[in-house]
Amino acid sequence: MSWIIFATLTAFFESSKDVASKRGLKTLDEYVVAWSMIFFTLPLMLPLLGIIEIPELGNNFIWALLAGGTFNVVSMLLYIRALKLADLSLAVPLVTFTPLFLLVTSPLIVGENPTVMDAVGIVCIVIGSYILNLKHRQQGLLAPFQALLTEKGPQLMLLVAFIWSLSSTIDKVGVKNSSPTFWAIANYSYIAAGMFPIMLYKSRNSLQQVVQNLPTLMPIGFLQGLVVLCQMQAISLTLVAHVISIKRMSALLSVLWGHLIFKEKGLKERTAGATIMVIGVLFITLA
């Protein structure tokens, strides 16, 4: 059962990366943090090219890389922006909407149809998202949902979840036309290259910021690299669905870190909401 260890480490490093990113955003803009998160994974991932067997690339590899990589460039920028604008304990659990959106995008792209278990998962995610914003309940019955749709941080994170529902489906195509490890390396290299000119354009003295803040930025990328490596190792030992289910426990950890490290309020309702949302992910993923 060593896959459980690697999957749990994936969740832990994922939440730790979000904490490091949130800290970095206190003094740096989101473009520098987002690019660094991707770029500083490469020292961990590129050496793997000397170890793994380079796969024969399928006909759909290039278009999958271009499409999936471009989606991820946008989603990573929005993800870091959402972390900057919203509480960690509110923003991160919203990525659990990705499997819900997948129930719409997967049938269109790869022909996967939802089941009864999927429906149960949807209900759990919706209920959990309501409880996350329960503090708005006094403003009206639907106020917790309205807060998700009107506040900038949650808006961006919901958009990220939708984009990930597209990019993760394209990831399947990329993996089938290469290999899991090679696809991860190619994808992250593309994202880093794609985000670089955006960072140069949007941030003043961006390269100077990176050099001057290496102790802050390098751990973000290092943690993201550990997420990828641990996830790939876990996937090699068991089903992808099992790994992703445990990985989503990072949402609960982020709620805890948000309270302990950043002194964010609403621990009870956000823990309850995130727990119900993760249960919904379990239903959908394991279905």
Image (cartoon, grey):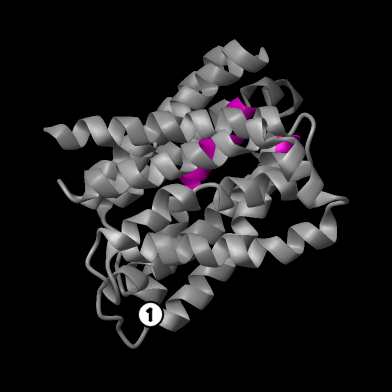
Indicate yes or no whether the magenta region holds residue 86: yes
Image position of 106 with respect to 268: above or below: below
Amino acid at dot 1: Phe
Give how far across and how far down residue 19 sits, in percent: 58, 27
Q: Residue at x 19, y 51 (%)?
A: 236
Q: Residue at x 48, y 30 (%)?
A: 15
What span is in magenta? 84-97
Q: Which residue is mark 1?
A: 61
73 sits left or right of 253 in the view: right
Please identify the residue farthest to the left as the structure is shown. 1
Q: Quadrant of residue 257?
A: top right
Indicate yes or no whether the magenta region holds residue 90: yes
How many residues crowd around disc 1 within 10 Å: few (fewer than 14), some, or many (20 or more)? some
Position of the N terminus by quadrant: top left
Give how far across and how far down residue 77 sits, in percent: 67, 53
Image position of 154 with respect to 1: above or below: below
Q: Secondary structure at mark 1?
A: helix
Q: Main secondary structure of the magenta part?
A: helix
